[in-house]
Amino acid sequence: MHEEMSADLWNSAVRVLETNWTGHHMVPSRRLYPHQWSWDAAFIAIGLAYANPGRAWRDLRSLFEAQWADGRVPHIVFDPATAEEDYFPGPAFWDVPGRGSTGIVQPPMHAVAAWEVYRHAAAHGADSALQARIELEWLYPRLVAQQDYLTGSRNLGGAGLACIVHPWESGLDNSPGWDAALAGVPADPDLLSTYRRRDLANADAAHRPTDLDYSRYVGLVLNYRAEGYSDEGLLSRHTFAVECPAFNAILGTAELALAQIAGELGRAAEATTHRERAHRITAAIAERLWDPRTRTFHCRDLRTDRLSPLHCVSGLLPLMLPDLAADQVEAVLGQARSARFGLPEQTGLPAPSYDRTAPEFDTLRYWRGPVWINVNWLLRRGLLVHGFRDEAEDLRTAMVRLVHRNGHFEYFHPATGEGLGAPTFSWTAALSLDLLA
Ligand code: 2M8
């Protein structure tokens, strides 16, 4: 990689993160997403670990200060300085007591992020190392509570996996993986006429979820909200309940990061417990989300107890788990290399969010085809975990080249590489720093 190209990309990434810093947290992008998002904060911290660890800790703290008493970390922390009409659905719609957050979650990337920021702290000097220790001590019990919520209250299927109760919880909002489960969610076309979709003021409608999707998204929130976001008996009164392979692979990876953190903090017994929990999560993913016919992972709809037959990039992410059985590792690698996802050796581009060969593949519409840097960063991590160094390096180079050529966009056209969505997007910038380091 040319030094000049690396320096350009590094500098532009730092500028994006400067622009999106509010003084107390990072926004994903200024106009489209004017609040703080949960898993964005984790990816952002991973990049800030190189450029500004103080801000990484500040951002994680802002998020965890909004953690609920039951351990859930909300998917959005609302900025009181932002007007209600600047994002839909905003705080009045969610109607959470205290009104500072939503009531749903996102993938628990934060233990991984905290460990990454901690691990790099000493490179910034003794004060940074000292601060990192204090922040890690502060975060550790909160990260444990987050995991306990997900493996406890959200273990709706009873097998030890976390169940998501809204597509927004996956982070892969309109992924085709949810289509079958969403078909069972009542869509009230009149519901949306009472609200205004703010996203369409800042993005092309063809690149976003449809109105039909949004009417279901809104209906699901209203249903969860009606019982104060309680998970008690949720399966019998909620129309969307899914076990996602990506969410649960991150859940298992988080336990492994917690084991490292606990070890560092001198809590050896707890470290052992976290490793055992990671092992159990891996076993449950292998048991419940693996389809021997397609030889890959799929999401399970708990309401029908069926696996989705579709191939989403989420099905590749259990590769992050070191205990995954060798035949499953080989099969997932085969999927990643196949025409469906075509690792860079075939396309020169990172993996798309959805199967290129499927009829629903849509080059523009958000999580239904475009390339996203965060999931490719996770996929690369999986490749490294299992020793596929050449593939991991090709993927890293493809990501760096894509962002350097096209800018720090939210997502990218999976054939041309053209940037789509928000143009100065925080996690694209932050992860670029990690990929360059
Ligand atoms: C997208 O989701 C939000 C809703 O949470 C939206 O569409 O308004 C997703 O890409 C999600 O993964 C991401 O965390 C969020 C902010 O970047 O935007």
Image (cartoon, rainbow, N blue to C red):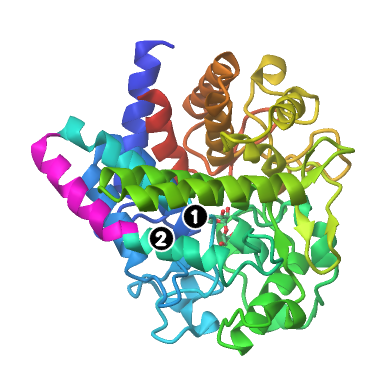
Front of the two marks 2 and 1: 2
Q: Which residues are magenta?
A: 125-140
- Give left or right: position of 9 versus 419: left
Q: Quadrant of the N terminus?
A: top left
Q: Position of residue 199 (x, y in %)?
A: 58, 62
In terms of secondary structure, where does tag 2 sit? helix
* Neighbours of disc 1 within 10 Å: few (<14), some (14-19), many (20+): many
Residue shown at 73% from the left, 32% from the top: 328
Whether residue 56 is visible to the viewer of this picture, yes or no, is yes
Q: Which residue, given by chain and number where applicable, does mark 2 sit on?
A: 144
> Going 79% across and 41% down the picture, which residue do you hit?
311
Quadrant for the C terminus in the image: top left
Q: Determine which residue is flagged by label 1.
A: 108
Amino acid of disc 2: Val
Q: Mark 1 falls on what kind of element?
A: loop
Magenta span dominant secondary structure: helix
Give the image quadrant in which the ligand numbered 1 is located: bottom right
Front position in the image: 383 or 198: 383
Q: Is residue 87 above or below residue 56?
A: below
- Residue at the left extreme? 126
Question: Residue 360: within the magenta?
Answer: no
Is 143 situated above or below 413? below
